[in-house]
Amino acid sequence: MGWIMPEPMSWESLGLQPASVDGYFFDPNLPAQIDTATASDDVLKQLGIPSRPDAAADADAYTAWKASFEKTLTYIPPKLTTFQRATRKGPMQSMGLTSSSWAGGVIPSPAGQTFKYITGRWKVPAANTPTAGPFANVPSTLASVWVGLDGGYATGANASGDVFQAGTDSMNSAFPLPGPNGAVVWTEWFPAPGVNYDGFPCNFGDDISVAMQFLGPVLWPLPGLGSVPLGRATITNHTTKNFTGIYGMVGPQPSGPNPFVGNTAEWIVETPQLGSCTNVFAALPALRDVTFDNAATVDSAGSESGPKSKSLQLFQMDNSGVGIGRNNGQPGTGTVVAIGGKDAAGRIQVAPQFN
């Protein structure tokens, strides 16, 4: 399938099949295995893997690439279930430096362009019970790490009502809502329901890449509702040498249409809401620093960029509001997750201050 579909098509004509959750599809023709040593650049990009350097032109870069990325990856077909324990927040109200639930980096799209692709790589953080700070000895904690497109603006001329995102959840064993404990991978096109990938290996410490790609308009399965955005999320576990992927769409919402805008790209650590409880957030676990590596974007002009962009805005999470895991609404008591910074290699570091 090409990178951008110029005209609305049906999911049937694209060769996709419906997944077990409405609004999601899978490609039955994906290969059982992919050898990254011989895969094309387009396939590597879909896996969230940078292109192979030319061994003759830069032997050191090629050797480093081989050590990090050369492997045979085995495909695991997606087995989806809807979220049971957490709801990720929607778009930020502004591109300010503080959010109630997000910490990370955001890039606005270049003038006259929109983002079509984003990728990032990180180690799945363990959800350990904090021993100090505002969440000390809280037995039930949850943190989401993800990359996504849209959501940086919720109001104004550039507003987007959606967030196309995928990542990992880290939860401890005492979390009070039903569902898996430990670590899981997931995809969500907010405000449509998100899905977990049951059976896909994901453990604390695993090396995960996520690549998100907007493909273009596709006809909504029900007649008379026109076209909606279609995107692809591919998740690669470099530790277990597996990959999976899903196609998702965000359809007409009760509040009106919700088109993809492509106005921002994000690399985020988030404290999600608990289930459907409005403004009731999970307690953050005792996270180690979360570092996003191999972070990159592609815009509608085909230009590649990422955290090296001078327009990158780093912001922090001030989760001092009332709710589970909060500090009874008292700000300034250490409940801030701060951003460590970025470097020329395109890394974003998220460093919890209170652990």
Image: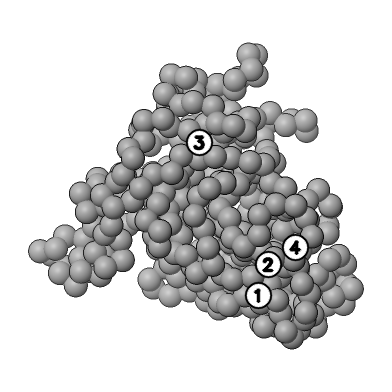
Q: Which residue has dot 2 on it? A: 172
Q: Is residue 176 above or below residue 5?
A: below
User: Residue 292, which numbered label?
Assistant: none
Marks 4/2 in contact by CB < 8 Å: the verdict is yes
Tell me if residue 214 can be seen: no
Q: Is residue 135 above or below residue 276?
A: below
Q: Which residue has dot 4 on it? A: 175
Q: In screen coordinates, is 36 left or right of 55?
A: right
CA distance separating discs 4 and 1: 12 Å
What amino acid is labelled 3 in the image? Tyr
Could you say whether the residue bearing mark 1 is in a helix, strand or loop? loop
User: What is the crowding at mark 3: few (fewer than 14 residues within 10 Å), some, or many (at least 20)?
Assistant: many
What amino acid is labelled 1 in the image? Asn
CA distance separating discs 2 and 1: 7 Å
Q: Which residue appears at 78% of the width and 33% of the height?
A: 255
Task: Locate the C terminus by quadrant.
Answer: bottom right
* Residue 284: percent from left, percent from top: 71, 70
The numbered mark, 1 or 3, whose residue comes first in the sequence reads 1
The numbered mark, 4 or 1, whose residue comes first in the sequence reads 1
Could you say whether the residue bearing mark 4 is in a helix, strand or loop? loop
Marks 2/1 in contact by CB < 8 Å: the verdict is yes
Marks 3/2 in contact by CB < 8 Å: the verdict is no
Q: Which residue has dot 1 on it? A: 128
CA distance separating discs 3 and 2: 29 Å
> Residue 302 versus residue 162: which sits nearer the camera?
162
Q: In screen coordinates, is 47 left or right of 219?
A: left
Q: Which residue is farthest top?
A: 223
User: What is the crowding at mark 2: few (fewer than 14 residues within 10 Å), some, or many (at least 20)?
Assistant: many
- Of marks 1 and 3, the one in the foreground: 1
The numbered mark, 3 or 2, whose residue comes first in the sequence reads 2
Q: In screen coordinates, is 304 left or right of 275?
A: left
User: Residue 247, which numbered label?
Assistant: 3
